[in-house]
């Protein structure tokens, strides 16, 4: 969406604050023995207690054959994104990593953010993967300034991931957000600087680098949502909703 009024901007900022607070509570809950279903229930309860709605629950993305059945996406280790938390028992173990992706609707404004969290102590390579993916998100945000193009953001993200020796997942990427969960433009996590749509003040975007420790290939599971790496390597995902302002991007879900 493009922000056209102060009221919209106030709602957007408030939505982001609320989503960030739910994600903080989820991060704190992550521990060996906790199930994906428990994280999903906590997310839904906290969102509803705030008077808001889960944005993913019941949402059918383009190409999907059924509505998403949960509040939260919980993707463990080689699960890349869109892991369903409440259709099987997924119990977190020491040394795992877990991606938590959450959308929230506040006063009709939708925000979207994700973090990947270590479960207990993880190995050095995994720490490096998490660090590089989060840094690539920050690099993408830094490039999201009025006058730059989508390709500048895409390129900044890919450079950071590849410099660290990891692979960029090509099939998935960021998107416009605000009125709908997924809006134009699509923001690949790789691309040529200076290419693609021009970024302008007031645009709300969700940037979401997705990296793997092995090869870039992913496959969709029979549940129609869960993406996994083809080679079984681990994957990390970080996402923020941002608002492009004159001086640069403001992180809405910080
Ligand atoms: Mg997203």
Image: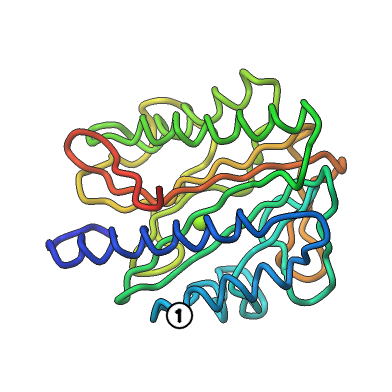
Q: Position of residue 42 (x, y in %)?
A: 61, 72
Compared with 206, 62 (above or below) is: below
Please indicate whether residue 16 sits to the left or right of residue 25 in the image. Answer: left
Compared with 32, 232 (above or below) is: above
Residue found 83% across the figure and 65% down from its top: 90
Q: Quadrant of the N terminus?
A: bottom left
Which of 129/82 is in front? 129
Please indicate whether residue 46 sits to the left or right of residue 224 in the image. Answer: left
Q: Quadrant of residue 222?
A: bottom right
Q: Position of residue 78 (x, y in %)?
A: 80, 47
Q: Quadrant of residue 36?
A: bottom right
Dot 1, how many residues are within 10 Å of its Cα: few (below 14), some (14-19), or many (20+)?
few
Q: Position of residue 220 (x, y in %)?
A: 77, 59
Reading the image, the residue beneath label 1 is 49
Which of 183/94 is in front? 94
Residue found 30% across the figure and 63% down from its top: 14
């Amino acid at each position: 969406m493009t922000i056209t009024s102060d009221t919209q901007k106030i709602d957007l900022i408030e939505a982001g604050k609320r989503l960030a607070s739910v994600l903080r509570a989820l991060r704190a809950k992550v521990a060996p023995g906790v199930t994906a279903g428990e994280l999903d229930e906590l997310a839904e309860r906290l969102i509803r207690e705030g008077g808001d709605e889960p944005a993913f629950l019941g949402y059918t993305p383009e190409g999907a054959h059924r509505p998403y059945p949960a509040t939260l996406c919980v993707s463990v280790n080689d699960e890349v994104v869109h892991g369903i938390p409440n259709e099987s028992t997924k119990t977190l173990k020491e040394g795992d990593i877990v991606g938590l992706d959450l959308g929230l609707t506040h006063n009709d404004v939708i925000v979207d953010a994700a973090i990947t969290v270590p479960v207990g102590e993880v190995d050095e390579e995994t720490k490096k993967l998490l660090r590089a993916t989060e840094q690539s998100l920050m690099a993408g945000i830094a490039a999201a300034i009025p006058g730059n193009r989508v390709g500048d953001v895409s390129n900044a993200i890919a450079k950071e991931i590849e410099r660290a020796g990891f692979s960029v997942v090509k099939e998935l990427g960021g998107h416009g957000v605000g009125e709908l969960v997924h809006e134009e433009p699509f923001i690949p996590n790789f691309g040529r600087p200076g290419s693609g749509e021009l970024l302008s003040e007031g645009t709300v975007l969700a940037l979401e680098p997705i990296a793997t420790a092995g090869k870039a290939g992913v496959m969709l599971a029979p549940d129609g949502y869960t993406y996994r790496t083809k080679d079984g390597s681990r994957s990390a995902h970080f996402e923020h909703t941002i608002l492009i302002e004159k001086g640069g991007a403001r992180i809405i879900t910080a």
